[in-house]
Amino acid sequence: MDIETLRQWIAQRDSFSILETIDVFTGERKFLKEFDHVIEAPNWTKDGKYLVFNSNGHMFTYEMATGDVKEIDTGFAIDCNNDHVLSPDNSELAVSHFTNEDATSRIYILPLSGGAPRLVTEKGPSYLHGWSPDGKRVAYCAERNGQYDIYTISVNGGEETQLTNLPGLDDGPEYSPDGKHIWFNSVRTGLMQVWRMEADGSNPTHMVNEESNNWFPHVSPDNQWVVYIAYKKGDVEPGDHPANKNVELRLIPATGGESKTIVSLFGGQGTINVNSWAPDNRTIAFVSYRLK
């Protein structure tokens, strides 16, 4: 665990976690379950039946119909962080796990039903955020030679492809459902802002230009909408996304345009690090927090 991750964990350890959903168009907010410990980053399965989240290094499912929580057998990968995604067919789960050798995050893939993880990224740190819709590549934020940029790699491992190369942090890369674009967030203009580029890294386009620090753009399954999390300018350093802050979840059309605030909440790190759109294209899952 690196120093920044340790700091964020300490900030959250005295928090209750509330797993919730919200209709992004009506604002209807539903409470699902409260936990007396930190959970983070729900993914929604494409059949709408389960949420997948991490807690204390382990991975879990929440069944929507019953509220049952069950742990996923992740083998030796028991130091998973909040950067995890499901394969397009939902047969596999990719996780970012802090390996024992050097306590650095690397990407592994295992069956969603549980099983032995296989290593994807030889180099670390690597923080997973996206899986291409054809199932062949994953996108991630990685630190190489002192700089954090966006990379992709085959799900079978091998040579990684660097897509960005500018000073400052580029993070949160996520494929659009049609595979044409990768959405991401970048500090290249000073504040953390939402960007989009072609899947090969070309034509970076500034999609959200606001006086706030905006993180983790997530695209709806129908490729029509994008949700992201916004920190108030001055509350955080542009390259930081800490826990236990007053934040907003905002919505924009995938073509760009003015944002709409969906909900204001106490959260931040762990709230919506990965895509949590429901298959209905109108509901998202997220985690809010309250201090003990």
Image (cartoon, rainbow, N blue to C red):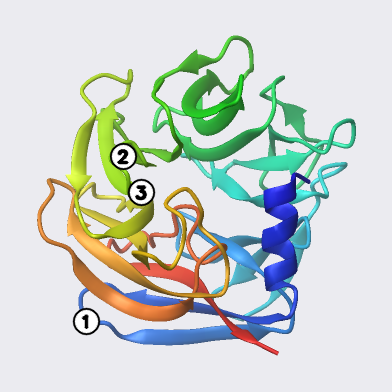
How far apart marks 1 and 2 lie (CA) works out to 24 Å
Q: Residue at x 59, y 47 (%)?
A: 83
- CA gap, disc 3 to disc 2? 24 Å
N-terminal-most mark, 3 or 2: 2
Front: mark 1 or 3: 3
Residue 60 in the image: state x and y as whole percent. 70, 62
- How far is the residue under mark 1 from the one under mark 3? 27 Å
Residue 91 appears in the rendering: yes
Tell which of 210 and 122 is nearer to you.
Answer: 210
Residue at the outermost top position: 159
Q: What kind of element bears circle 3? A: loop
| Residue 87 shows in this picture | no
Amino acid type for the residue under numbered disc 1: Thr
- The answer to which of marks 1 and 2 sits earlier in the sequence is 1
Point out the tag, 1 or 3, that comes first from the N-terminus. Answer: 1
Q: Nearer the viewer, mark 3 or mark 2?
A: 3
Decide: marks 1, 2 in contact (CB < 8 A)? Answer: no
Task: Residue at 74%, 41% (x, y): give it.
Answer: 97
Residue 222, x across and y down, in percent: 24, 50
- Label 1 neighbourhood size at 10 Å, few (<14), some (14-19), many (20+)? few
Residue, disc 3: 192
Write down the residue under mark 1: 26
- Is the C-beta separation of discs 1 and 3 under 8 Å? no
Residue plotted at (76% across, 47% down): 114
Residue that badge 2 annotates: 177
Q: Is residue 68 above or below residue 107?
A: below
- Identity, as a three-letter code, of the amino acid under mark 3: Met
Of residues 279 and 22, the one drawn nearer to the viewer in this rendering:
22
Q: The residue under label 2 is which amino acid type?
A: Pro
Q: Is 86 situated left or right of 276 in this image?
A: right
Q: Secondary structure at mark 1?
A: loop
